[in-house]
């Protein structure tokens, strides 16, 4: 949870606010948790905190970014129903216990968060580390690589 939006780039803040976000936004995550639990997903604290603030937002950004095209997001964990086995197969390349956050806006890749609070972009057998929480979200929306990545 962040007290305000001053640590987000202005273009990201504008896109998030247009999607319905505000710095004090809080949503109930219990429906997502209940829908995904029977599949074996257990919502950890990092995912709970992130989804409480950003869950339910659809942010359809596009265009040139800093390192690649800007990536819009749909932050709805139930978009990942049916993917538990696939998520588990990718855990070895992350901090483990990936929890679904939603999808890239066009649905070509899934978004997940590990127990350390890092967002990952998942596509086929590839896992791209994006960054922690709001910073990771901003990197997606800005088309920016995490430090140390190509």
Image (cartoon, grey):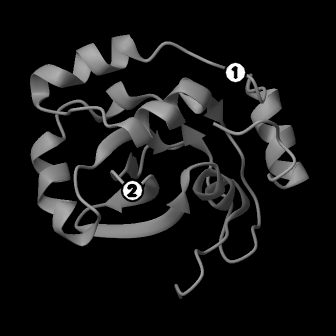
Asked if residue 7 lies left or right of residue 111, the reply is right
Seen from the viewer's position, the closer of residues 45 and 67 is 45
Asked if residue 56 lies left or right of residue 61, the reply is left
Q: Residue at x 87, y 51 (%)?
A: 11
Is 39 rendered above or below residue 129?
above
Q: Residue at x 9, y 46 (%)?
A: 85
Q: Tag 2 or tag 1, which sits nearer the N-term?
A: 1
Q: Crowding at label 1, few (<14), some or many (≥20) Cα neighbours within 10 Å?
A: few
Q: Residue at x 39, y 49 (%)?
A: 113
Asked if residue 5 lies left or right of residue 24, the reply is right
Query: Which x, y percent locates residue 110?
Result: 38, 48
Residue 148: which numbered mark, if any?
A: none
- Mark 1 lies on a secondary structure that is loop
Is 71 rendered above or below residue 44?
below
Query: Which x, y percent locates residue 38?
Result: 11, 20
Residue 25: which numbered mark, if any?
A: 1
Confirm whether residue 75 shows in the render. Answer: no
Confirm whether residue 18 shows in the render. Answer: yes
Mark 2 lies on residue: 116
Residue 9 falls in image quadrant? bottom right
From the image, state whether disc 1 or disc 2 is nearer to you: 2
Query: Which x, y percent locates residue 36?
Result: 23, 24
Is 88 rendered above or below residue 68?
above
Query: Which x, y percent locates residue 144?
Result: 67, 70
Which quarter of the image is occupied by the N terminus? top right
């Amino acid at each position: 949870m962040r007290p305000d939006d001053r640590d987000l780039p202005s273009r990201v803040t504008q896109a998030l606010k247009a999607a319905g976000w505000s710095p004090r936004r809080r949503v109930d995550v219990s429906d997502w948790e209940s829908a995904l639990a029977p599949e074996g997903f257990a919502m950890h604290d990092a995912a709970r905190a992130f989804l409480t603030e950003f869950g339910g937002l659809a942010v359809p950004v596009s265009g040139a970014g800093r390192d690649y095209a800007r990536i819009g997001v749909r932050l709805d964990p139930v978009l990942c129903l049916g993917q538990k086995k696939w998520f588990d197969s990718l855990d070895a390349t992350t901090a483990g216990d990936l929890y679904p956050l939603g999808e890239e806006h066009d649905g070509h890749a899934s978004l997940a968060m590990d127990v350390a609070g890092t967002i990952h972009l998942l596509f086929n057998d590839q896992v791209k580390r994006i960054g922690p929480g709001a910073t990771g979200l901003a990197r997606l929306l800005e088309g920016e690589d995490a430090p140390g990545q190509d």
